[in-house]
């Protein structure tokens, strides 16, 4: 539908134009303006990166990467074309590529974005404040449970909208926002309309998604008391909790000649928080002091309670001292399997306790 301007004695139709005719460029104009006012197309969203492409073997980049109030990542793709191209397929690829991002990795990404924007805000504090989380509420297993996709374009082809509606029916959250430019003498006006899902049907879809979200939260809040029997070289420790079970396996692997950095590579979901380390063969007190000073220089704190930091738990390897994380949840079993499959000759077995 066209846009009209109401005047005192008549209603005047505004001339529809295009971004190309108006001299609006996709990246230097449209993207630049929306990153500062992202609520225009995606309310309750914090932009954490622009032109994001931190993955191997690909030159693809996400126009804008955001985080919403539910701690979900938001892929935002912008096109000034008249049909949207194949942006839905592109966005789905991006969503898959960022699906393994951890909370700590997102902090790193946001820090780079803030530096690029010449802002001095603390990335960690800004994200925690945006989410309404306290430091002790951070849970990697509850972070980025879903990926939302926002497609913004001057128009969308029938092929694209059909694909998006089909994906929405299968619980993939994709929204199409039409950005239609109009000219009024020297003014350029922008009509912003959400066309998928249609506003009239959105409430129903929101209710369905909300039900799914509540069920997911309920599952996440239910305590997981799974215990594991860990067998090493024929000797079994029964009914070990998650953190102690995987620590016992990792400690054994390191004592059997496996470099902690090799173990870090085996468990990609927790790669950035799996170990804290420093040079030298240190005892617990020295290790905590050194890590505390180093983190302080970065404007952070060393959260010793999140690592195995007792003297008997520290791992010494090649002139360095490592502390292993004790933050383990539903990914424990998967991580145990990955370690045993990677190092099958180290005499390690496990099973869920009866």
Image (cartoon, rainbow, N blue to C red):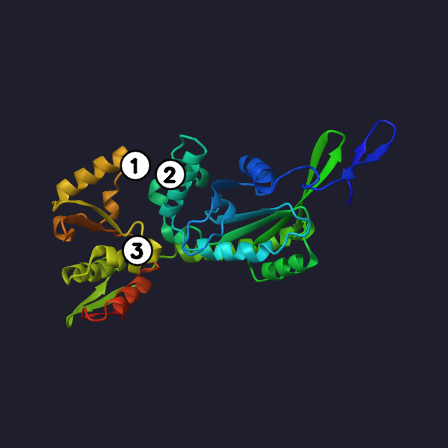
Q: Earlier in the sequence, mark 1 or mark 2?
A: 2
Q: Residues within 10 Å of mark 3 (few under 14, many from 20)?
A: many
Q: Residues within 10 Å of mark 1 (few under 14, many from 20)?
A: some
Q: How far, Cα to Cα, is label 3 from label 2?
A: 21 Å
From what the image shows, is residue 343 above or below residue 175?
below
Q: How far, Cα to Cα, is label 3 from label 1?
A: 22 Å
Kindly identify which residue carries mark 3.
328
Give the percent coordinates (x, y) of residue 294: 23, 37
Residue 13 in which image quadrant: top right
In the image, 329: left or right of 169?
left
Residue 3 or 235: which is nearer the viewer?
3
Indicate the quadrant containing the N terminus: top left, top right, bottom left or bottom right.
top right
Give the percent coordinates (x, y) of residue 24: 64, 38
Specify whether residue 101 is in view.
yes
Q: How far, Cα to Cα, is label 1 from label 2?
A: 9 Å
Specify whether residue 225 is in view.
no
Q: Earlier in the sequence, mark 3 or mark 1?
A: 1
Give the percent coordinates (x, y) of residue 80: 64, 45
Label total for image: 3
Farthest top residue?
8
Q: Which mark is residue 300?
A: 1
Residue 12 in which image quadrant: top right
Kindly identify which residue carries mark 2.
124
């Amino acid at each position: 539908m066209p846009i009209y301007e109401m005047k005192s004695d008549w209603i005047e139709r505004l001339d529809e134009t295009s971004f190309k005719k108006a001299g609006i460029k996709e990246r230097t104009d449209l993207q630049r303006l929306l990153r500062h006012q992202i609520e225009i197309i995606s309310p309750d969203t914090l932009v954490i990166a622009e032109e994001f492409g931190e993955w191997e073997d690909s030159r693809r980049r996400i126009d804008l990467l955001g985080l919403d109030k539910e701690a979900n990542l938001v892929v935002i793709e912008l096109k000034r074309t008249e049909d949207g191209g194949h942006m839905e397929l592109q966005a789905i690829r991006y969503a898959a590529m960022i699906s393994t991002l951890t909370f700590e990795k997102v902090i790193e990404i946001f820090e780079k974005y803030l530096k690029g924007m010449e802002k001095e805000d603390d990335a960690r504090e800004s994200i925690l404040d945006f989410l309404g989380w306290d430091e002790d509420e951070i849970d990697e297993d509850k972070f980025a449970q879903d990926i939302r996709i926002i497609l913004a374009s001057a128009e969308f082809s029938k092929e694209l909208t059909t694909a998006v509606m089909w994906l929405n029916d299968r619980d993939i959250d994709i929204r199409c926002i039409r950005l239609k430019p109009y000219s009024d003498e020297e003014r350029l006006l922008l009509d912003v309309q959400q066309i998928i899902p249609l506003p009239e049907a959105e409430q129903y879809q929101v209710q369905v998604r909300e039900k799914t979200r509540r069920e997911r939260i309920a599952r996440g809040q239910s305590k997981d008391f799974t215990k594991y029997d860990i067998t090493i070289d024929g000797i079994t420790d029964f009914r070990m909790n998650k953190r102690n079970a995987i620590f016992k396996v990792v400690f054994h692997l390191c004592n059997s000649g496996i470099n902690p950095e090799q173990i870090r590579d085996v468990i990609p979901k927790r790669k950035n928080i799996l170990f804290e380390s420093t040079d030298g063969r240190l005892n617990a007190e020295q290790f905590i002091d050194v890590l505390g000073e180093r983190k302080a220089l970065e404007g952070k704190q060393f959260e010793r309670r999140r690592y195995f930091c007792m003297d008997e738990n520290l791992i010494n390897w090649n002139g360095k001292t490592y502390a292993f994380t004790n933050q383990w949840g539903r990914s424990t079993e998967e991580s145990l399997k990955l370690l045993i499959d990677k190092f099958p000759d180290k005499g390690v077995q496990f099973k869920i306790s009866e």
